[in-house]
Image (spheres, helix red, strand yellow):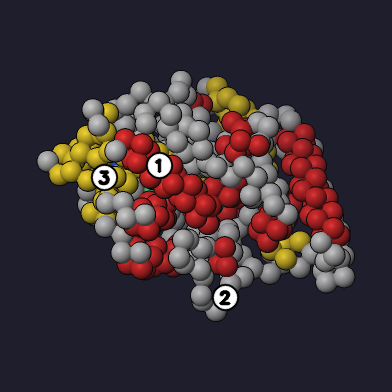
């Protein structure tokens, strides 16, 4: 049985950032990865995906973007290259093709079964990803068998879909990007829209992530957020990794010819029923966007930047077609595919320790799993700050958790 001080599960950006922090603290560890480095980006993302965060923001401990396009958006292949180089840069002790099958608490630490090997460690860092399984609503069971269903984890390109109309359920970053792409392939697309986060790609000449970072919003700490559960389950913003003036809001999608309908509520006898509150959902998203733009303007004024930035302005409200259908018969042949862009969830099924709540989510306090001392989790949305949802957030999160882990080890010595 192999003995080590810490085991990190997963060699995505979060696991690699943690590895770097552990090395900095001379903590002996191994990173166990079921595939290769950046496995999720290699196997679970569609090839045309680009990050929606700009290149300058793709930074990790000891690594800043040094390319010639800081304002651009990385294609998924470049994310893989960046993380593979980062693993080499920080000399991460990654064991690839090593699937963690169980982690159990034992005296003095944890026992980890990985492939057919047993390991012992005093600490375990779960960095196995927040988006490894699709979050599919129960209503999916009622889709008629004649209709193909697919999730973003297995979607690759429109050519994979049967001819005919596509119902995309969910209008966050993934839903709007795939609705746009599938529509451009010539298939009629209907987009089902529930609660969503509308943000412009650029505002007053700057990328929206510049504003989110500059105003301090992304740095808001988890223990200072009023409704943390809500913040952790907030849908991703309606953005795509495209430069220039391209706006991918619902108005733009409607102008392209994509049909917008309300939230999918039920499917009864093959008939999909959509909520009649589409206009309300859109009005709320517009209101929240404007609230953030007000905050951005106030921050710019207080920072003395008004003279250096183009004037403030507001975007057209979302226009909702009052004739938007409330029902769609999925048996009529008009819809041949339903794409569930309804979010993702982590897979912690291999954790054989009672640390999950009723809904299956890992109970933790800013990444520290209080019910199992020595167990940590990294890479979850709003783990320690709002930036935790994004790649660059792993920088401060891994630092704080590595400090905690180090103190934990010292206290047990
Ligand atoms: C569609 C999509 C678009 C996104 N776009 C952006 C963006 O533009 N900008 C941004 O900053 N963030 C983006 N994110 C969010 C975030 O960067 C990802 O969720 C990110 O992949 C999380 O990194 P991670 O290292 O925590 O997990 P992952 O990248 O998922 O890495 C986890 C690793 O753990 C491995 N693993 C899992 N289970 C086991 C096991 N049992 N044993 C061994 N290994 C295991 C996996 O193979 C994987 O390599 C996006 C996410 C998605 C889903």
Q: Quadrant of the C terminus?
A: top left
Residue at x 58%, y 72% (from the top left corner): 70
- 149 versus 218 height, above or below: above
Q: Is residue 50 left or right of residue 201?
A: left
Circle 1 residue: 407
- Callout 2 secondary element: loop
- Circle 1 or circle 2, nearest the eye: 1
> N-terminal of the two: label 1 or label 2?
2
Mark 2 vs ligand 1: CB below 8 Å: no
Q: Which residue does the image show at 58% across and 58% down from the upper left?
A: 52
Q: Nearer the viewer, mark 2 or mark 3?
A: 3
Instruction: Establish if 92 lies above or below 292.
Output: below
Q: Which circle marks residue 357 in the picture?
A: none
Q: Position of residue 27 (x, y in %)?
A: 31, 51
The residues bearing labels 1 and 2 have C-alpha atoms spaced at a distance of 40 Å
Q: Badge 2 is on which residue?
A: 69
Question: What residue do we see at 73% from left, 29% from top?
Answer: 276
Alpha-carbon neighbours of circle 2 within 10 Å: few (<14), some, or many (≥20)? few
**Label 2 vs label 3: CA separation?**
40 Å
* Residue occupied by mark 3: 5
Mark sitting earlier along the chain (2/3): 3
Label 3: which secondary element: strand
Q: Which dot, 1 or 3, sits closer to the camera?
A: 1
- Left or right: where does residue 303 sit relative to residue 30? right
Q: On screen, 239 above or below 110?
A: below
Q: Quadrant of residue 130?
A: top left
Numbered circles on residues, count: 3
């Amino acid at each position: 049985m192999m003995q080590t001080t810490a085991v990190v599960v997963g060699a995505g950006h979060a696991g690699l950032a943690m590895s770097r922090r552990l090395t900095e603290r001379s903590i002996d560890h191994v990173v166990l990865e079921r595939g290769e480095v950046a496995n999720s980006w290699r196997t679970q993302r569609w090839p045309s995906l680009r990050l929606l965060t700009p290149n300058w923001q793709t930074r990790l401990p000891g690594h800043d973007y040094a390319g010639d396009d800081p304002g651009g958006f990385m294609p998924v292949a470049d994310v893989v290259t960046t993380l593979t180089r980062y693993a080499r840069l920080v000399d991460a002790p990654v064991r690839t093709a090593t699937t963690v099958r169980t982690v159990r608490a034992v005296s003095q630490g944890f026992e980890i079964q990985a492939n057919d090997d047993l390991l012992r460690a005093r600490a375990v860092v779960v960095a196995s990803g927040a988006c490894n399984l699709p979050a599919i609503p129960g209503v999916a069971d009622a889709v008629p068998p004649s209709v193909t269903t697919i999730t973003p984890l297995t979607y690759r390109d429109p050519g994979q879909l049967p001819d005919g109309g596509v119902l995309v359920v969910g209008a966050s970053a993934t839903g709007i990007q795939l609705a746009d792409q599938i529509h451009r392939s010539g298939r009629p697309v209907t987009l089902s829209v529930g609660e969503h986060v509308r943000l412009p790609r650029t505002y007053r000449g700057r990328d929206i992530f510049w504003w989110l970072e500059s105003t301090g919003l992304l740095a808001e700490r988890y223990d200072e957020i009023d409704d943390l559960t809500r913040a952790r389950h907030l849908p991703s913003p309606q953005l795509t990794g495209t430069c220039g003036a391209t706006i991918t809001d619902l108005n733009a999608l409607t102008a392209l010819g994509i049909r917008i309908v309300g939230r999918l509520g039920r499917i009864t006898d093959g008939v999909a029923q959509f909520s009649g509150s589409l206009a309300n959902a859109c009005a709320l998203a517009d209101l929240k966007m404007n609230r953030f733009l007000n905050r951005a303007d106030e921050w710019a004024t207080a920072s003395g930047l008004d003279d250096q930035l183009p004037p403030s302005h507001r975007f057209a409200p979302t226009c909702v077609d009052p004739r938007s259908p409330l029902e769609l018969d999925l048996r009529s042949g008009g819809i041949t595919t339903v794409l569930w862009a309804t979010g993702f969830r982590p897979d912690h099924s291999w954790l054989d320790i009672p640390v999950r709540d009723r809904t299956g989510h890992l109970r933790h306090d800013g990444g520290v799993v209080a019910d199992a001392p020595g167990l940590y989790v990294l890479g979850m949305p709003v783990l320690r700050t709002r930036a935790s949802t994004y790649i660059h957030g792993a920088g401060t999160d891994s630092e704080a958790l590595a400090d905690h882990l180090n103190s934990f080890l010292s206290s047990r010595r």
